[in-house]
Amino acid sequence: VDLSWTPQDYVIAIDVGGTTIKTALVTEPGQIIDRRRTPTPGTSAGAVIEAVLREAESAVQWGAQRIGRPPLAVGVASAGLVDEMAGIALHSAALGWRDVPLRALLAARTGLPVVLGQDLRAAALAEAGEDPTAPSFLFVAIGTGLGAALVHRGSVDAGARGLAGELGHVPVAPGRSGDGQPRRCGCGARGCLETQASARALRRGYRDRTGADLSAEQVAHQARNGDSDAAAVWDDLIEALTSGLVAATALLDPGLVVFGGGVSLAGEQLLAPLRERLAARYRLAAPPPLRVSALGDQGAVRGAGLLGWQHLRTPERVR
Ligand SMILES: [Zn+2]
C-alpha cells in the first residue's frame, strides 16, 4: 500500500482535436472528476496554440477551485504526428501546425511538468487501462483518416521517429479514381489504406458514384438499408481494411484488434464481414478476435490523463 497517495491528487488531461479541445481532471485510478470542452479555433496554427495554452492555464485555476489544491502535472494528447520524446507536435493538417514545441510552451505557461503524446496512441493506452489483463493488442482508429497503435504490456512503441502505426498509409487499393489509378492520399502517395477505409473515403466514394454528399454515418446507414451504391462503398472499405489487417496481423501477431473512431460505431456492420474475410485471407493461424472500443470519443482524453500520471511516476522514460 502506497501511503503517500491521497485521493485529492490529480492531473490535468487535455485532448487537442481538430474540432474540439477536451479537458478533464483525472485522479490516479483513472477517475475523471470533472470534464469540459471548448471548440478548436479555425485552422491558424497561432490561434490553436494560444487556445491550448489558455485552456491549460485556465484548467489549473479550475482544478484548484474544484479540488482545493493545484494539479501535479499536465498530460496532453494531440492530433497529427507527434515526437513524444522531444515534446514536439510535428504536423497536423487539421490543426494547421508544424513543428510546435508544445511541451515546452505548456510547461512555461503553467509552471507544471507536461507530457505530450499523440491522440491515437493515448486512446490506445486508455483502452489498455480499461483491461489491464488484455493481451498485446492492436488499436485501429478509423475516423477522418486511419491509424493504429500496438499496445504491449500497457505501453505503446512510437517507433524511431514517432511514425509507428501509420497503417493508413500502407498501400492496398487497386485503381479507383476516374483515371483508373489508385486514389491520391493526403500524404502524396496513391492507394493508401485510408483512401478506401476512412470516414473521408466513405463520403468521397459515395459522392463519386452518385453525386450526393452524405456523411460517413449516413453512408453506413444507407448501406444497411438496401442502397446498392452505399453497400458497394462500404464493401470497398471492408475489402481494403481486410488487406491492411492481413498485413498488420502477419507482422505483429496481435492478440486482439480493437477499433475506435467514428466509423467503428457501425459495430457488427464493420466487424462481421471483416471477421469472415480476414479468416479467408489470413491462413497462418486463427485470426485475432475483433471488437469495438467502449470508450467512444473519451479515449484520448483518458489516455492524456494516464500519460500525465505515468510521467509523474517515471519522468525519464515516458512515451
Ligand atoms: Zn497516404
Image: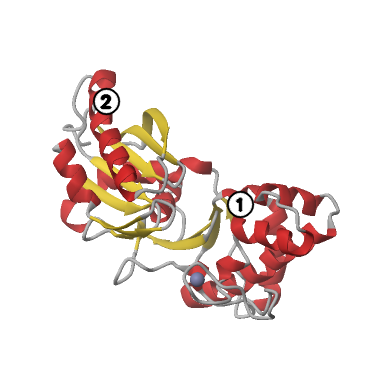
Q: Nearer the viewer, residue 157 or 46?
A: 46
Where disc 1 sits, the SS reads helix
Q: Nearer the viewer, residue 124 or 223?
A: 223
What residue is rendered at 78% in x and 54% in y? 223
Q: Amino acid at mark 1?
A: Ser
Circle 1 is placed at which residue position?
264
Above or below, 148 against 74 in this view is: below
What residue is rendered at 51% in x and 75% in y? 170
What residue is rendered at 53% in x and 42% in y? 296
Horizontally, residue 236 falls left or right of residue 142, namely right
Q: Earlier in the sequence, mark 1 or mark 2?
A: 2
Horizontally, residue 172 falls left or right of residue 188, namely right
Q: Position of residue 204 (x, y in %)?
A: 66, 60
- For the rendered model, the colour scheme is secondary structure
What residue is rendered at 56% in x and 66% in y? 194
Q: Position of residue 269 (x, y in %)?
A: 72, 54
Indicate if the residue with disc 2 has its beta carbon within 8 Å of ligand 1: no
- In what quadrant of the picture does the C terminus appear? bottom left
Assess disc 1: are there few (<14), some (14-19) or many (≥20) residues with their C-alpha within 10 Å of its C-alpha: many
For residue 101, the mark is none
Q: Quadrant of residue 113?
A: top left
Q: CA distance from mark 1 to mark 2?
A: 33 Å
Q: Nearer the viewer, residue 300 or 312?
A: 300
- In what quadrant of the picture does the N terminus appear? top left
Where disc 2 sits, the SS reads helix
Question: Would residue 146 be seen by someone viewing this image from the given angle?
Answer: yes
Q: Position of residue 261 (x, y in %)?
A: 54, 51
Q: Position of residue 311 (x, y in %)?
A: 22, 48
Q: Amino acid at mark 2?
A: Gly
How many marks the image carries: the answer is 2
Circle 2 is placed at which residue position?
63
